Image (tube, rainbow, N blue to C red):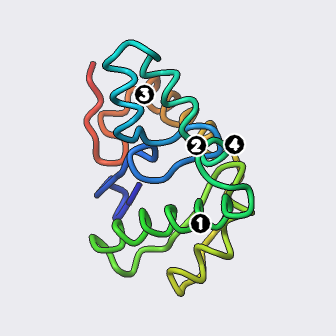
Amino acid sequence: LLVSGGRIIGALDACIFAPGIQHGALDVDAIRRIDRGDITANDAFLNAGVDYTVPPELRVETMAMFAAMECAAMLLLNPIARVALAGSMAPAIASGVEALLTRDIVIYDEWCAARGLAKIARDTFLGAHQILGLAVDR
């Protein structure tokens, strides 16, 4: 997610690009298995993370590379933006992402999204008309 000037400027869905430990993008084989009815799309998504698709010794490095690629894509929209990682794996992949991007990054814990969503819910309940530049439907 790229936020600039208090507005959302760009975003990528993580499962499209960067896999997690358990969840990940669907490859062609998974799509074919879904189409044949062998598995559901949800089952494919739940078993596409690095724990299922990458050898153990390459998992952290792989996650760091994909996360850095996502950040680099967002940096095209704002090259001077600060970069932050969040989630349970953020501390493990941070040094790899910093090395690939050649810049310092900030690490947030796995609860930062929940705290942010709570603030969005509060602001919506209190009558906000916009949140991060997005209109709030009433």
Type of residue at label 1?
Ala
Type of residue at label 2?
Gly
Compute the Cα span from label 3 to label 4.
20 Å
Compute the Cα span from label 4 to label 1.
20 Å
**Residue under numbered circle 4:** 111
Question: Circle 1: is it few (<14), some (14-19), or many (20+) Cα within 10 Å?
Answer: many
Compute the Cα span from label 1 to label 2.
13 Å
Dot 3: element: helix
Say whether marks 1 and 3 touch (CB < 8 Å): no
**Residue under numbered circle 3:** 124
Residue depicted at x 38% and y 45%: 16
**Residue under numbered circle 1:** 64
Residue depicted at x 62% and y 53%: 54
Q: Earlier in the sequence, mark 4 or mark 1?
A: 1
Dot 2: element: loop
**Residue under numbered circle 2:** 49
Question: Circle 3: is it few (<14), some (14-19), or many (20+) Cα within 10 Å?
Answer: some
Residue 61, picture quadrant? bottom right
Type of residue at label 3?
Thr
Residue 4, picture quadrant? bottom left
